[in-house]
Amino acid sequence: MERPFAGKVAVVTGASRGIGRATAIALAEAGAKVVLAARSTSQSPGKLPGTIDETARQIEAIGGVALAVPTDVSRDDEVEALVERTLREMGQVDILVNNAAINYPYLLVETPMRRWDLVLNVNLRGTVLCTKAFLPYLLERRQGTIINLSSYLAVVPFPRTLAYSVSKIAIEKFTEGLGKELAGTGVSVNCLRIEVNIATEGWTYLNPNVDTSSWEKPEVAAEAILWLAAQPPSFNGRIVTIEEVRNLRAQAPS
Ligand SMILES: NC(=O)c1ccc[n+]([C@@H]2O[C@H](COP(=O)([O-])OP(=O)(O)OC[C@H]3O[C@@H](n4cnc5c(N)ncnc54)[C@H](OP(=O)(O)O)[C@@H]3O)[C@@H](O)[C@H]2O)c1
């Protein structure tokens, strides 16, 4: 089996379930050592299925190397500890996937400000915090890449999802601006804007009466994230959908 990420260390936030778990497993299959960051652990599971310890076991079962680090990405001290353990136990960092996110599916008038703040803190601040924390170590080695996650809800107005939408369009702007700052450094940042519904534990839970049988699988997003992670540093500051990634892949010389 081809192992294009052999020798690389990848950090995936929100790796306890859904797209984060699928991405972590796909990276491990492709040879990367993977650091799994989320809040749910076997000691302290969340209300939805999936923990970072289960993801680690799945990776180890296929012969991969995983390090589960309980992390709330909105907390400075926990992100600092994530960086510290990554460097101490894995030696380096090459890929950061800022995947962790939450939604609060209520109208604005029903949304307490502490909920608004929580969505912005996890999705936007968490992405910025993890990026800022790992970036010096990527820049030091003049290599590596950051992949942020956005959604069609960043650009398509939709009720009951305002804080989430605002966080995602801000992540896109953050990606574009940081891309300019990183130009020529050997380090890149890009954003995958997922334009389809993906049947994950979280998104399915938030859509209880919806037929999800036509929704895509998390592996579809993972495949696009791995493609982004494999691009040269000149591919930088871009926001691409899954379909755009497929088209770019089809154009690339084999
Ligand atoms: N599914 C879709 O159709 C879809 C569409 C567009 C974009 N996306 C984007 O894709 C990404 C993954 O979505 P998903 O559907 O896989 O979501 P999900 O099933 O709800 O999983 C979310 C992940 O984020 C983690 N997380 C939440 N709060 C966290 C915190 N404070 N600190 C650390 N980790 C936290 C969760 O782990 P813990 O609870 O264990 O912390 C979980 O692992 C998100 O950025 C989402 O916006 C998804």
Image (cartoon, helix red, strand yellow):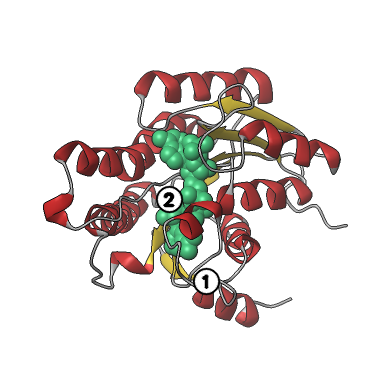
Categorize mark 1 by other alpha carbons within 10 Å: few (<14), some (14-19), many (20+).
Answer: some
Q: Is residue 204 left or right of residue 123?
A: right
How many numbered marks appear?
2
- In which quadrant will I find the C terminus? bottom right
Closer to the camera: disc 1 or disc 2? Answer: 1
Quarter-wise, where is residue 250 in the image? Answer: bottom right
> Which label is found at residue 13?
none
Q: CA distance from mark 1 to mark 2?
A: 26 Å
In the displayed orientation, state which residue is furthest to the front.
209
Mark 1 vs 2, N-terminal side: 2
Can you say whether 69 is above or below 9 in the image?
above
Can you say whether 118 is above or below 233 in the image?
above
Q: Is residue 205 left or right of residue 85?
A: left
Query: What amino acid type should be assigned to the residue bearing mark 2?
Result: Gly
Q: In the image, is the residue at mark 2 within 8 Å of ligand 1 by its beta carbon?
A: no
Image coordinates for residue 224, horizontal then vertical, percent: 58, 64
Can you say whether 202 is above or below 224 in the image?
above
Q: Which secondary structure, mark 1?
A: helix
Q: Which residue is mark 2?
A: 184
Q: Residue at x 69, y 78 (%)?
A: 253
Q: Residue at x 24, y 55 (%)?
A: 106
Q: Which secondary structure, mark 2?
A: loop
Categorize mark 2 by other alpha carbons within 10 Å: few (<14), some (14-19), many (20+).
Answer: few
Quarter-wise, where is residue 206 in the image? Answer: bottom left
Label 1 close to label 2 by CB (< 8 Å): no
Q: Which residue is mark 1?
A: 242
